[in-house]
């Protein structure tokens, strides 16, 4: 390729990146991966990602905050959110910063426990299933134990 073709490739990659980001937010790693899938060369993809970063269209920290809020609203825990961010190519230091202020929603955990147990904490097997469901959502054992204790107390008060 000559210089003019390189410039054209870089321009097209930047245009494509802008269109992708207009549809939905992406991490820098996701954007680069998608550009490479569209058969842009590594240099053009890297240029486009950096250009979008300079323009403020790509911000991994803001993207991570968005993902944290979205998954927290769905009732997911820290481990699940951390996994989702890693899959999306967010750097570990940005993940740590985004999760620093994250506090799992006790209400979300209690809601899921109530949905599973319907106030009956006497069936050990059902309690274990409900705890496993919370674990799959990404809550830690200590968070699950605290939620289970709170749910048991609530259930005993209702009886």
Image (cartoon, grey):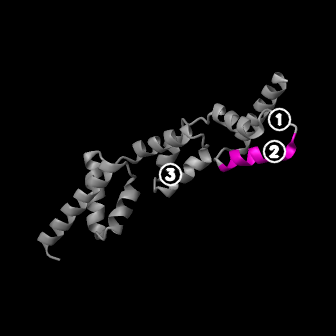
Asked which secondary structure carries label 2, the reply is helix
State the mark number for residue 85: 3
Q: Residue at x 77, y 48 (%)?
A: 129
The single residue placed furthest to the left in the displayed view is 4
- Between the C-alphas of marks 1 and 2, the distance is 9 Å
Q: Is residue 55 left or right of residue 58?
A: left
Disc 3 or disc 1, which is closer to the eye? 1
**Magenta segment boundaries in residue numbering:** 123-136
State the mark number for residue 126: 2
* Sooner in the amino-acid sequence: mark 3 or mark 1: 3
**Residue 1 included in the magenta stretch of the image:** no
Quarter of the figure with residue 61:
top left
Measured from the top left, where is residue 122 in percent x and y? 88, 37
User: Taking 45 as reference, is 94 above or below it?
Assistant: above
Asked which secondary structure carries label 1, the reply is loop
Disc 2 or disc 3, which is closer to the eye? 2
Measured from the top left, where is residue 73 in percent x and y? 54, 37
Q: Which residue is mark 1?
A: 120
Q: Residue at x 28, y 67 (%)?
A: 43
- Between the C-alphas of marks 3 and 1, the distance is 36 Å
Residue placed most toward the observer, 92 or 130: 130
Q: Is residue 108 left or right of residue 2?
A: right
Asked which secondary structure carries label 3, the reply is helix
Total marks in image: 3
Q: Are marks 1 and 2 in contact (CB under 8 Å)?
A: yes
């Amino acid at each position: 390729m000559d210089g003019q073709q390189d410039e054209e490739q870089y321009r097209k990659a930047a245009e494509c990146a802008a269109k992708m980001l207009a549809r939905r937010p992406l991490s820098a790693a996701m954007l680069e991966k998608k550009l490479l899938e569209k058969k842009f060369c590594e240099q053009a993809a890297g240029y486009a990602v950096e250009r979008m970063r300079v323009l403020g269209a790509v911000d991994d920290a803001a993207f991570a905050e968005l993902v944290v809020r979205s998954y927290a609203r769905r009732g997911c825990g820290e481990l699940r959110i951390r996994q989702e961010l890693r899959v999306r190519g967010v750097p570990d230091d940005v993940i740590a910063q985004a999760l620093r202020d994250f506090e799992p929603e006790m209400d979300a955990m209690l809601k899921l426990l109530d949905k599973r147990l319907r106030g009956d904490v006497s069936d050990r097997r059902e309690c274990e299933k409900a705890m496993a469901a919370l674990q799959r959502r990404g809550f830690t054992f200590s968070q699950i134990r605290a939620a289970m204790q709170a749910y048991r107390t609530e259930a005993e008060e209702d009886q």
